[in-house]
Amino acid sequence: MENLQYPVGRFSYNPPNEAQRQVHIETIRNLPWQLRELSAGLSAAQLEQPYRPGGWTARQVIHHLADSHLNAYIRFKLILTEDKPTIKPYDEKAWAELADTFQAPIEASLEILEGVHARWTTLLENIRGEQWRRTGFHPEHQREISLLEFLALYSWHSRHHLQHIRIIMEKG
């Protein structure tokens, strides 16, 4: 079950060097088109299929990525413009149970991801030096988290959920 829940492994943070940071940025840049390409191959039945027992459906995963990455983009902007802001947590499981997650076409979230990731990538490419060490306080984790760690986290998050979609596709 662990392999289905965390198909790329659990997130663990090691401060990235410059080359690794660029790989993380490229992962974030490429998520929208990779997700669009993968989701184009999903049947109507597969959209409603979970990647594991008790897991989210493909539709929920796609909408979750839009919700999560909208929040991530805002978090980056807050950390860059405020001194150690408190990051607003949200209940992602509750969000995944709202009507828009079950009823909205995935195209709506694919379009959100394309726009947000275009802006987010531009922002990421222009963060310099010590700016990467700026932090926000995350009350859920009871600690400060740097932009570098958030970058690594959302790069992992992108790969993690793309793999969930692949698992659904492999099931047929």
Image (tube, rainbow, N blue to C red):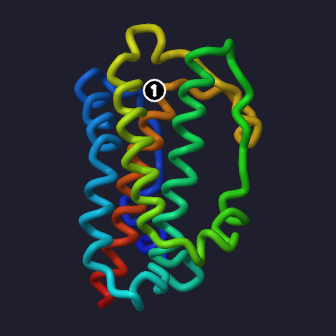
x and y, in percent, of residue 159 in the image? 35, 55
Image point (32%, 37%), residue name: 24
Q: In which quarter of the image is residue 107?
A: bottom left
In the rendered view, would you say 37 is above or below 144?
below
x and y, in percent, of residue 92 in the image? 66, 58
Locate residue 95 relative to residue 150 in the image: left or right. Answer: right
Crowding at mark 1 (Cα within 10 Å: few <14, some 14-19, many 20+): many
Locate residue 42 relative to residue 67 in the image: left or right. Answer: left
In the rendered view, would you say 126 is above or below 48?
above
Image point (27%, 47%), residue name: 30
Image point (36%, 59%), residue name: 8
In the rendered view, would you say 91 is above or below 115?
below
* Residue occupied by mark 1: 148
Q: Quadrant of residue 91?
A: bottom right
x and y, in percent, of residue 49 in the image? 46, 86
Q: Quadrant of residue 138?
A: top right
x and y, in percent, of residue 160 in the image? 40, 58
Closer to the camera in the image, 95 or 19: 95
Q: Which residue lies furthest to the top in this view?
A: 130
Image point (26%, 58%), residue name: 34
In the rendered view, would you say 94 is above or below 46?
above
The quadrant of the picture occupied by the C terminus is bottom left
Q: Is mark 1 on a helix, strand or loop?
A: helix
- Tag 1: residue type? Leu
Locate residue 28 relative to residue 72 in the image: left or right. Answer: left
Closer to the camera in the image, 84 or 119: 119
